[in-house]
């Protein structure tokens, strides 16, 4: 029996080696006019404003453009507009609303050559229609905050319009989420707003050319399997290189990898692809055949601490928890150093990042001292206990099935164990974890997940004391830790309306210092997105933030 | 025991007993497709220490009759009096004393013994169920019974499959005797046994009858065995008794054409090679749809119009006491 | 007179038949060995001088050494010891679930078969209904249930082992049908057996007849069916793990070890190979064992010539 | 026969009705709702938004009321909308069902075509080398974790040999019968390998049992040769229990399809059900589960009809 | 092991000669001889009755003639001479041509001996199809004719029915029709009436007699019922524990049994005139073939047995009147 097992083991190892080394190169004879992208999730809808979902954003970014977006250097740029309006250039004018609140009027001009795929020009009629749909309570547009704040639109002409907001924030000109709907196709369908989300052309006739005005348009959709995109003749910008782009959906990452190796797909999107450790492992074996590009960005992996937990109330314990961890080692060993350790929720690439804040390098001695000070004394090799004899036991939860997190979790557990902190793992499927446990603050101690934000995103819903979810407020808000700090509330409110960058930078620094000092959450690292690209693919530049790389798809080419 | 039975009352008296079964179906959606008239108005008496044989071919209702008398089936109609006490309509608890006095022996010694119980436990089971004796008393009683039926003490720890058919039937008999019954219903007790074993078992049953004053309701299809073993014989056809008489009278002077046919069909050793003779034609009709009138008329060599129209009653025939037959022509000479 | 025809009991006969079934014998030996090793996992751990719960980031994917006979996993833990701990869980889940299912199935089948008629009709329609259910999709629904909404105490729901109990409960809840049908069929036949009639004629109660006369005669088929189902439960656990609904880490089971490792199938194929082959060997062994038991306990073969 | 069919259809409708409520209730017991998931995907959503959407999607009412509403609409022919795919449930379901039926149909045909003859061969020479080999293969098929096998198949055939696609249903743009057939090879092989063992074992057992019957001896006493005995006399009788078991296995096949579809990125029912449950797409999950049950019920019905055709003793009134 | 007594007995009119037939079963407890040196002849138009208790080897002997002994049984010795061939030496293919065509068989259980999924007509016609290459219609017509011959009413209609739609007696008639359709030389009837009621048994026994007269077939009639045998057989052979213990013309054997076992069998039968009271009985039980007594295998139940009987197995020896008996104490 054992001989058989051993022989089979050897055979399998050989298979693996063969796969790693002696792979057949994908058929190189045909001209590279098609690009097949592998992602792990299929868009649930193609309507730009209903339900937000990364897979949809990824595909749609090739077919349409927002007015504004952050580029790869995290700077706000115009995409559909001709000129970015600012207070400095006079296109944005602060004003008072009718009821005396500070507001602003921002004027944009649609690119003159912007035309829907069926030849209809993109006009202010589309702008007004989109706003109408967004404001309507029955449409199913998930996030209406923007549309409510935008209380009026002054149409100048076919291409120029002014948006009037009842709020004045430093992000007054960023309307990245304002995705135009084709009024000429959608207005009739909007006649019955209740039924609109089921009748929209985007989902009933997804391949309609009139829905798109980007470099590509969708020409074929196989639900759950793939989306085919072909160049859009009415596109104003540079001619896209690929005659066809296929986005294939393969949910299982191992299968995704196999598909890449077999040449069935050309690349794996960073936004929705392999986990970092898979990519690192993949690079070790196939680095010669593929470019693996890592882009650490605005996905902030951390552990929310439930501050109502009697143990975690003590900030010494929270600090000890962080000192006990060797996050550098985790980053280095598990992720080949591709995911930088986070010291607060602000990414170092963000211009408001402050470096001179409290940091917590791996220091078991300090951790032990802090715990002793907090009354948690070590008893031999076992779990620390307090005077009452209660053990230092905490529970950590995360999304079941997310291998990276499960791995890290076990490392954390092991590192804490060395200091006599007994941490129990209890994971749940994402739908439960996010559907209930985290959002209703049902985790007893620690919840490990990530925040995704935009550059210079203000953590109002996360850190402001008004945003602690409770049954009374119908679990609104994302201050899951239950963090309450008057100064923090104040800072958040001031940052939002501070238009002066220098002043804002000072406020931001203060926010980061408080965050790092009080530790409502344990910062782990900024997640990196691994792009697995064929050597011949050029022009793809990861952004590291919410605006996906496909917004610049027309620059992609094969060489 | 309540008030003792009147001295002249028979041990068992069955009157107008009817047992019908619904045929087929019974499922959630399936409809009943008819009624099997397994026993259709049977009356007889059985005295203490007497042997009454029920004879008939398959499907005639003899086994159903036996099981109804043994209280395994609730009768559809009619009365069963045992030791003067009416048993029909009694509940489980009230039936228990009677159950102790009425015991059964089955045809197949392979299926009548639980293969997972040792023989000792099988014989002791009636004692346990009726709550008789302590552990030690039961053990003694089982040993005594085993000796009576010719088994050894060492056999009590063995399992049924380690015994031959004849030995198993002895075990079954021991079990029946454990609670001192006064009536034993024996349903084809020897038909599954080899010829050389049959006589052993019949002899044992006879010895025990003498020793314990047992009455037997003896069911068989084998006329030769019945003739040898029974005091009285009742012949059944399609749920009814067609003729009843003391054994000798029945074989010497059968009054029902069916009885005659049965006797004629029975092969006999030493009669010489068979010559094709008067063999009963046709098959036994289904008890689901018994023929009208006399149920035997489709096969009867004597059948007349009256037989097709009215069913004959079981009445005195042949002149001898206790000889009764149900035939319109019971008093005519045999052909 | 009292010459017993066979010199040995039923058990001896079955044992002898079983011994002839070499694959079954080998399977039984392999399973016992696996079970012993799994139970002895802490001893193995101590003997090797490793602690499988401690992560060692500096010793990931280590090759086989004296201290780590099968090397280490992606977190530097000893693969062998983790496999043994996983075996504990997988075998436990398999056995307990199969037993629970067998108990449920036996009760349902016994009642249906013993009473027959409408009771039988109703119970069997219900069983057919359960069989008609698309098993795995339903398991997914059940696995996603919120146990607190069902009314279980929060302390239980939040315990670390809840995924273990959940799997056992879920699989047992749908896995009893085989045994139920089997028992029901056999009980329908047995209730017509003369020895059951004999007990009825004595006035024995329903419980006594079921317990003394019917159930003991169903032991063989129940044992066989249960043995066979242990294997399928272990497989099912691995499948549920694959879908992320099985036993949750940190409790190791072969299912979740394999599922974790499949993403590493390129980096460390052995990590996927070991649990895969252990599941395979265990399941096939239970199948062979069941097959052998079936031959050995077959009542038709029992009566013999 | 007509009456039997009518009864069975009535039974199936009852089962489906019960199932639909049971599933609805179960779904009600699952934590969270679609809106919770939207919130977690879009941090900027306000509680007002969430409440508005809950109302819009009708998930703010109690389960029983929702079920009643759904049932009324379903009886009127409206099975609702899939939230996950933003389309009427049937539009999502039917193509997936088609794909799965192709997969299952091919698998069934193939595994029967292999399993039944193998079982017969094994039964003809019980305890021979051939029998052992067939048994070993059958048991191996039953015992291997299907997803593991699927990955191995992909590694060997798609990656190392590069002869077959690793997943999907067709080459984009390169459509055609042969192209689609190529994509079916591995999933069908995966499912077949997993189910053929069972068929083999059942057939072997049934055949061995049949060959022990008296009428086989009668046929041989008539001078029937081996082929005639097996094909003319034994096969049809042996098929009777096998048909029942295969029908019962229909549900299991669906389960196997789920795994296979996941591994091979094959857009079928199994994957749809999984995704819809995981994605809180109540309508889709419910209808898809009902369809899966319906297919199983139809399978059982077909088995009963086959059964009656095989066995003249069965008459369905 | 004594030599089979074949040398002195080779009547030219025998159609089938069985010599020293031996069938061995491999069991858990070693090899067991279910038939041990069985020899007999069958003559055209005559019936040989084979009687014995369960497990004595009657059925195995019958099946061995057609080489249909089920595993784990094997024919381990002897010869079956038929038309100049030793059936035991023929190829399986050649044996198939004999079965059903030259030698056919009627089984005990008409319920299980018919294939439940084929019509009676098809099953009867099958032998014709196999052996005579008859066409479907032709074979079917012959089957209907045969059904009529065995006394089945509405034969054309009955041919299209399935076995379960017939009564036991009808099925046994159909079985006889099936056995006779190819006009065989030999009919082996293995307990053909045991499963039937007496009145039906009488019908079938009569039918078999009729058929024998019509077709001139030699019948090997097997039964445990001595009465049935006595009414059917011209010659009777008694088997005990795998061996033939006595063989004689029927009248002679029944009137004057020579072997103590035969005597016991006849005496134990309840008979008219014996009267009620205890029956004579053979003590003990039918022996287990795996645990036979030394010497004569009846010695442990035999009232006459002495040390000589327990020392060596008595051979089957000839006695006056064309009789054979295997007993040292055989009454002369």
Image (cartoon, rainbow, N blue to C red):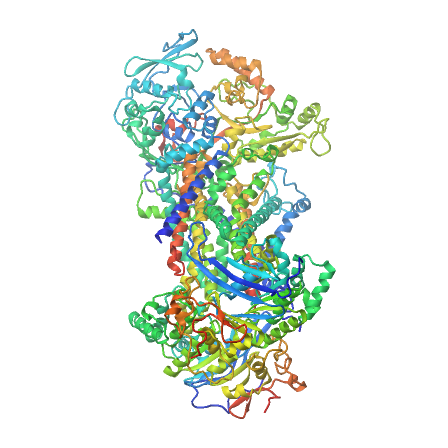
Q: Residue E99 occupies which quadrant of the picture?
A: bottom left
**Residue A334 vs residue C295, the one in the foreground:** C295
Residue D204 x, y percent position in the rendering: 47, 61
Residue A353 x, y percent position in the rendering: 52, 19
Residue A169 x, y percent position in the rendering: 45, 13
Q: Which quadrant of the rendered structure holds the N terminus of chain B?
A: bottom right
The residue located at (60%, 44%) in the rendering is C89
**Residue A369 vs residue C130, the one in the foreground:** C130
Q: Residue E261 occupies which quadrant of the picture?
A: bottom right
**Residue E257 vs residue B208, the one in the foreground:** B208
Q: Which quadrant of the rendered structure holds the C terminus of chain B?
A: bottom left
The residue located at (71%, 64%) in the rendering is B141
On screen, residue E49 versus residue C34, left or right, reads left
Q: Residue furthest bottom?
A: E320
- The total of numbered circles placed on residues is 0
Residue A516 x, y percent position in the rendering: 58, 20
On screen, residue B183 versus residue A208, left or right, reads right
**Residue E26 vs residue A228, the one in the foreground:** E26
Q: Is residue A423 above or below residue B261?
A: above
Q: Is residue A148 above or below residue D179?
A: above
Residue E18 appears anywhere in the view: yes
Residue E170 appears anywhere in the view: no
Q: Is residue B110 above or below residue A442?
A: below
């Amino acid at each position: 029996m054992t001989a058989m097992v051993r022989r089979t083991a050897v055979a399998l190892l050989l298979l693996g080696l063969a796969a790693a080394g002696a792979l057949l190169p994908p058929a190189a004879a045909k001209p590279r006019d098609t690009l097949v992208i592998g992602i792990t999730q299929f868009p649930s809808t193609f309507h730009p404003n209903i339900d937000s979902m990364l897979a949809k954003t990824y595909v749609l970014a090739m077919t349409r453009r927002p007015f504004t977006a952050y580029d790869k250097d995290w700077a706000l740029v115009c995409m559909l507009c001709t000129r970015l309006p600012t207070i400095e250039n006079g296109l944005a004018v602060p004003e008072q609303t009718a009821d005396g609140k500070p507001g602003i009027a921002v004027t944009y001009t649609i690119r003159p050559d912007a035309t829907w795929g069926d030849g209809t020009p993109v006009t202010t009629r589309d702008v007004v229609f989109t706003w109408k749909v967004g404001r309507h309570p029955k449409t199913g547009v998930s996030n209406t905050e923007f549309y409510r704040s935008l209380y009026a639109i002054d149409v100048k002409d076919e291409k120029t319009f002014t948006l009037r907001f009842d709020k004045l924030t430093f992000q007054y000109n960023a309307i990245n989420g304002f995705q135009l709907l084709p009024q000429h196709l959608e207005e009739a369908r909007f006649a019955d707003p209740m039924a609109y989300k089921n009748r929209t052309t985007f989902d009933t006739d997804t391949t309609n050319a009139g829905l798109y005005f980007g470099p590509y348009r969708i020409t074929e959709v196989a639900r759950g399997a793939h989306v085919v995109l072909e160049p859009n003749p009415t596109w104003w910008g540079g001619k896209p290189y690929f005659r066809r782009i296929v986005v294939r959906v393969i949910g299982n990452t191992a299968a995704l990898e196999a598909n890449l190796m077999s040449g069935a797909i050309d690349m794996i999107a960073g936004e929705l692809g392999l986990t970092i450790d898979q990519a690192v492992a993949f690079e070790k074996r196939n680095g010669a055949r593929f470019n693996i590009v890592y882009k650490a960005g605005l996905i902030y992996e951390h552990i929310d601490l439930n501050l109502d937990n009697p143990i975690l109330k003590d900030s010494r314990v929270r600090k000890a928890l962080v000192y006990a961890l060797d996050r550098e080692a985790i980053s280095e060993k598990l992720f080949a150093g591709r995911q930088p350790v986070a010291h607060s929720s602000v990414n170092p690439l963000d211009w408001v990042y402050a470096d001179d804040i409290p940091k917590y390098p791996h220091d078991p001695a300090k951790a032990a001292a802090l715990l002793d000070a907090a009354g948690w004394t070590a008893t031999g090799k076992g779990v620390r206990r307090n005077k009452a004899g209660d053990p230092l036991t905490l529970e950590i939860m995360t999304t079941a099935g997310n291998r990276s997190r499960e791995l890290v979790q076990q490392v954390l557990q092991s590192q804490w164990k060395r200091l006599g902190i007994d941490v129990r793992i209890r994971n749940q499927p994402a739908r439960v974890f996010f559907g209930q446990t985290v959002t209703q603050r049902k985790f007893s101690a620690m919840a490990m997940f990530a925040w995704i934000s935009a550059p210079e995103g203000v953590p109002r819903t996360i850190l402001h004391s008004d945003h602690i979810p409770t049954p009374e407020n119908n679990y609104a808000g994302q201050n899951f830790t239950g963090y309450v700090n008057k100064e923090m509330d104040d800072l958040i409110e001031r940052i939002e309306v501070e238009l002066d960058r220098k002043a804002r930078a000072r406020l931001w620094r203060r926010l980061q210092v408080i965050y790092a000092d009080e530790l409502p959450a344990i910062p782990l690292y900024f997640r990196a997105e691994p792009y697995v690209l064929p050597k011949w693919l050029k022009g793809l530049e990861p952004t590291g933030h919410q605006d996906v790389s496909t917004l610049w798809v027309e620059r992609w080419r094969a060489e | 025991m309540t008030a003792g039975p009147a001295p002249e009352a028979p041990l068992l008296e069955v009157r107008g007993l009817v047992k019908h079964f619904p045929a087929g179906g019974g499922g959630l959606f399936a409809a009943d497709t008819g009624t099997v008239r397994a026993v259709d108005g049977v009356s007889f008496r059985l005295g203490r220490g007497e042997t009454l044989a029920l004879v008939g071919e398959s499907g005639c209702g003899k086994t159903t009759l036996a099981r109804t008398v043994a209280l395994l089936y609730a009768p559809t109609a009619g009365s069963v009096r045992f030791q003067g006490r009416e048993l029909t309509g009694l509940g489980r608890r009230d039936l228990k004393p009677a159950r102790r006095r009425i015991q059964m022996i089955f045809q197949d010694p392979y299926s009548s013994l639980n293969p997972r119980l040792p023989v000792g436990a099988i014989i002791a089971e009636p004692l346990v169920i009726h709550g008789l004796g302590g552990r030690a008393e039961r053990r003694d009683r089982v040993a005594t019974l085993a000796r009576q039926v010719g088994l050894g003490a060492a056999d009590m720890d063995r399992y049924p499959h380690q015994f031959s058919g004849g030995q198993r039937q002895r075990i079954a008999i021991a079990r029946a005797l454990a609670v001192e019954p006064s009536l034993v219903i024996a349903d084809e007790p020897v038909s599954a046994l080899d010829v050389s074993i049959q006589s052993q078992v019949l002899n044992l049953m006879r010895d025990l009858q003498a020793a314990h004053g047992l009455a037997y309701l003896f069911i068989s299809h084998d006329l030769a065995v019945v003739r040898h073993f029974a005091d009285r014989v009742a012949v059944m056809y399609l749920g009814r008794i067609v003729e009843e008489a003391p054994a000798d009278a029945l074989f010497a002077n059968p009054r029902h054409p069916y009885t005659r046919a049965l006797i004629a069909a029975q092969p006999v050793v030493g009669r010489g090679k068979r010559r094709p003779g008067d063999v009963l034609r046709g098959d036994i009709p289904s008890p689901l749809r018994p023929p009208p009138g006399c149920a035997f008329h489709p096969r009867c060599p004597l059948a007349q119009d009256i037989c097709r129209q009215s069913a004959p009653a079981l009445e005195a025939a042949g002149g001898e006491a206790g000889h009764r037959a149900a035939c319109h022509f019971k008093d005519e000479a045999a052909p | 007179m009292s010459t017993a025809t066979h010199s040995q009991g039923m058990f001896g006969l079955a044992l002898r038949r079983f011994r002839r079934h070499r694959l079954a014998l080998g399977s039984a030996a392999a399973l016992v060995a696996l079970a012993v090793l799994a139970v002895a996992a802490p001893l193995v751990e101590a003997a090797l001088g490793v602690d499988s719960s401690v992560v060692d980031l500096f010793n990931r994917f280590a090759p086989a050494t004296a201290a780590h006979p099968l090397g280490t996993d992606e977190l530097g833990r000893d693969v062998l010891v983790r496999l043994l701990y996983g075996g504990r869980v997988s075998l436990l889940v398999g056995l307990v679930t199969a037993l629970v299912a067998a108990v449920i199935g036996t009760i349902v089948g016994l009642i249906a078969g013993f009473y027959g008629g409408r009771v039988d009709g109703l119970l069997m329609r219900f069983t057919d209904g359960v069989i008609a259910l698309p098993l795995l999709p339903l398991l997914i629904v059940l696995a996603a249930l919120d146990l607190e909404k069902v009314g279980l105490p929060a302390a239980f729901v939040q315990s670390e082992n809840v995924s273990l109990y959940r799997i056992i409960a879920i699989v047992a809840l749908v896995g009893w049908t085989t045994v139920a049908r089997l028992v029901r069929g056999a009980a329908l036949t047995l209730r017509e057996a003369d020895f059951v009639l004999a007990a009825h004629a004595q006035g024995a109660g329903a419980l006594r007849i079921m317990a003394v006369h019917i159930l003991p005669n169903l032991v063989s088929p129940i044992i066989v069916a249960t043995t066979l189902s242990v294997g399928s439960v272990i497989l099912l656990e691995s499948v549920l793990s694959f879908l992320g609904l099985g036993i949750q880490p940190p409790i190791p089971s072969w299912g979740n070890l394999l599922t974790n490792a499949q993403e590493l199938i390129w980096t460390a194929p052995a990590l996927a190979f070991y649990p895969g082959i252990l599941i395979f060997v265990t399941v096939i062994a239970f199948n062979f064992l069941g097959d052998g038991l079936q031959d050995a306990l077959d009542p038709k073969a029992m009566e013999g010539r | 026969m007509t009456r039997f069919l009518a009864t069975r259809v009535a039974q199936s409708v009852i089962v489906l009705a019960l199932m639909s409520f049971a599933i609805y209730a179960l779904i009600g017991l699952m934590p969270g709702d679609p809106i919770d998931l939207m919130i977690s995907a879009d941090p900027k959503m306000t509680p007002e938004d969430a409440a508005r959407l809950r109302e819009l999607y009708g998930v703010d009412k109690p389960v029983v009321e929702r079920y009643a509403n759904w049932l009324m609409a379903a009886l009127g022919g409206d099975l609702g909308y899939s939230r996950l795919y933003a389309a009427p449930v049937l539009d999502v379901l039917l193509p997936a069902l088609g794909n799965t039926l192709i997969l299952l149909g091919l698998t069934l045909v193939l595994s029967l075509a292999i399993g039944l003859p193998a079982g017969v061969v094994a039964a003809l020479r019980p305890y021979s080398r051939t029998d052992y080999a067939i048994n070993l293969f059958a048991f191996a098929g039953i015992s291997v974790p299907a997803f593991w096998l699927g990955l191995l198949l992909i590694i060997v055939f798609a990656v190392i040999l590069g002869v077959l696609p690793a997943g999907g249903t067709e080459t984009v743009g390169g459509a055609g019968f042969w192209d689609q057939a190529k994509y079916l090879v591995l999933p069908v092989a995966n499912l077949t390998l997993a189910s053929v063992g069972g068929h083999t074992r059942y057939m072997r057992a049934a055949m061995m049992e049949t060959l022990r019957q008296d009428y086989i001896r009668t046929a041989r006493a008539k001078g029937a040769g081996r082929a005639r005995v097996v094909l003319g006399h034994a096969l049809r009788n042996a098929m009777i229990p096998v048909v029942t078991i295969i029908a019962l296995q229909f549900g299991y096949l669906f389960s196997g399809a789920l795994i296979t579809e996941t591994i091979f990125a094959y857009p079928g029912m199994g994957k749809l059900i999984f995704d819809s449950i995981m994605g809180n797409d109540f309508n889709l999950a419910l209808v898809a589960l009902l369809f899966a049950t319906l297919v199983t019920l139809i399978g059982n019905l077909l088995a009963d009809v086959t059964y009656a055709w095989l066995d003249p003793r069965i008459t369905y009134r | 092991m004594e030599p089979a007594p074949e040398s002195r007995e080779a009547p030219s009119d025998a159609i089938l000669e069985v010599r020293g037939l031996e069938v061995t079963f491999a069991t858990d407890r070693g090899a067991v001889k279910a038939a041990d040196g069985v020899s007999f002849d069958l003559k055209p138009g005559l019936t040989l009755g084979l009687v014995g208790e369960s497990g004595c080897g009657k059925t195995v002997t019958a099946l061995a003639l057609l080489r249909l002994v089920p595993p784990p049984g094997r024919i381990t010795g002897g010869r079956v001479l038929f038309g100049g061939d030793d059936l035991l030496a023929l190829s399986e293919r050649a044996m198939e041509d004999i079965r059903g065509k030259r030698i056919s068989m009627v089984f005990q259980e008409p319920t299980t001996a018919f294939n439940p999924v084929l019509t009676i007509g098809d099953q009867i016609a099958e032998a014709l199809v196999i052996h005579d290459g008859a066409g479907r219609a032709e074979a079917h017509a012959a089957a209907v004719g045969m059904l009529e011959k065995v006394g089945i009413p509405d034969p054309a209609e009955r041919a299209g029915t399935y076995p379960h739609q017939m009564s036991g007696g009808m099925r046994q008639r159909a079985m006889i029709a099936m056995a006779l359709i190819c006009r065989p030389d030999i009919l082996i009837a293995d307990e053909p009436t045991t499963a039937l009621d007496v009145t039906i048994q009488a019908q079938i026994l009569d039918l078999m007699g009729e058929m024998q007269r019509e077709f001139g077939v030699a019948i090997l009639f097997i039964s445990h019922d001595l009465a049935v045998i006595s009414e059917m057989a011209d010659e009777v052979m008694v088997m005990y524990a795998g061996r033939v213990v006595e063989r004689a013309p029927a009248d002679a054997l029944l009137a004057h049994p020579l072997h103590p076992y035969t005597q016991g069998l006849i005496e134990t039968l309840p008979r008219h005139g014996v009267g009620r009271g205890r029956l004579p009985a053979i003590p003990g039980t039918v022996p287990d073939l795996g645990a036979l007594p030394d010497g004569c295998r009846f010695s442990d139940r035999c009232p006459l047995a002495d040390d000589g009987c327990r020392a060596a197995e008595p051979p089957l020896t000839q006695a006056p009147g064309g009789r054979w008996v295997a007993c040292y104490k055989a009454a002369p």
